[in-house]
Image (spheres, rainbow, N blue to C red):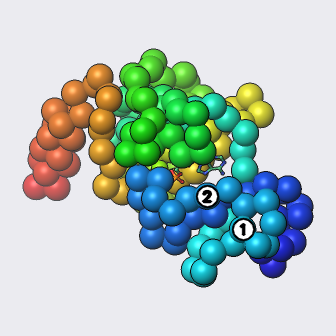
Amino acid sequence: MAGQFIKKHTKAVSKPVYGFDGVGIHLVESEGDLGDPPFYLQEYVPNDRDFRVFVIGDQAVGAIMRVSDHLTHNIHQGGCGSAIDIPKEMAKIAVQAAHCVGVDYGGVDLLAYNGSYVVLEVNGTPNWHCMQAPIPQFLAEYLILQDKQNQ
Ligand SMILES: Nc1ncnc2c1ncn2[C@@H]1O[C@H](COP(=O)(O)OP(=O)(O)O)[C@@H](O)[C@H]1O
Ligand SMILES: [Mg+2]
């Protein structure tokens, strides 16, 4: 199975099943590059940066791009994060991704892909490093609103 996937896509990215901060992620170009299971594989998407979009409820409230000269652009892997304006398409996909996995708030990691974006993962406990938007304030406001609506 893994071998077929690698042949089909030429390059794949191996990720731990429970991973964070870019730890344990590596490029796979042949079956010999595979480590010990469990892991999962994604098609490698060529890029020079990724995007982290912070979603609360129905809104994308902040985003950064992370740039590095290696595979994993996570801040913990040395990526350089800077706040960006959120294009409509990015906001739409990030909100849909958060809704798909049923989180009230989340950090959605995206790569640019075919004129749009592909979702790498949705983080249920996201950090907000480098975001300019006041995320703690937004979160507090959202939680208070939810609490009022549930009374
Ligand atoms: N399919 C992929 N193609 C290219 N780069 C990827 C791919 N998946 C992950 N990466 C790189 O690795 C980083 C970490 O991947 P991610 O899935 O967000 O896991 P983590 O939970 O460790 O942050 C991404 O931000 C991106 O820079
Ligand atoms: Mg990530």
Residues at marks 2 and 1 touching, judged by CB atoms closer than 8 Å: yes
Q: Looking at the image, which is closer to me, 148 or 80? A: 80
Q: What residue lies at 61% left-to-right and 58% top-to-bottom?
A: 26
Mark identifier at residue 33: 1
Residue 20 position within the rendered picture, expressed as x and y whole percent measured from the top left? 41, 58
Question: How far, Cα to Cα, is label 2 from label 1?
Answer: 9 Å
State whether residue 44 is above or below residue 50.
below
Name the kind of residue labelled 2 in the image: His
What crowding class fits label 1: few (fewer than 14 Cα within 10 Å), some (14-19), or many (20 or more)?
few
Q: 95 left or right of 2?
A: left
What crowding class fits label 2: few (fewer than 14 Cα within 10 Å), some (14-19), or many (20 or more)?
some
Name the kind of residue labelled 1 in the image: Asp
Quarter where residue 74 is shown = top left
Q: Identify the secondary structure beneath mark 2.
A: strand
What residue is shown with label 2? 26
Q: Residue furthest bottom?
A: 37
Q: What residue lies at 87% left-to-right and 72% top-to-bottom?
A: 4
Q: What residue lies at 33% left-to-right and 41% top-to-bottom?
A: 56
State whether residue 102 is above or below residue 109.
below
Residue 53 position within the rendered picture, expressed as x and y whole percent measured from the top left? 44, 36
Q: Looking at the image, which is closer to me, 18 or 116? A: 18
Q: What residue lies at 68% left-to-right and 65% top-to-bottom?
A: 41
Question: Of the residues under marks 2 and 1, which one precedes in the sequence?
Answer: 2
State whether residue 101 is above or below residue 149.
below
- Quarter the N terminus occupies: bottom right
Q: Looking at the image, which is closer to me, 46 or 146? A: 46
Q: Identify the secondary structure beneath mark 1.
A: helix
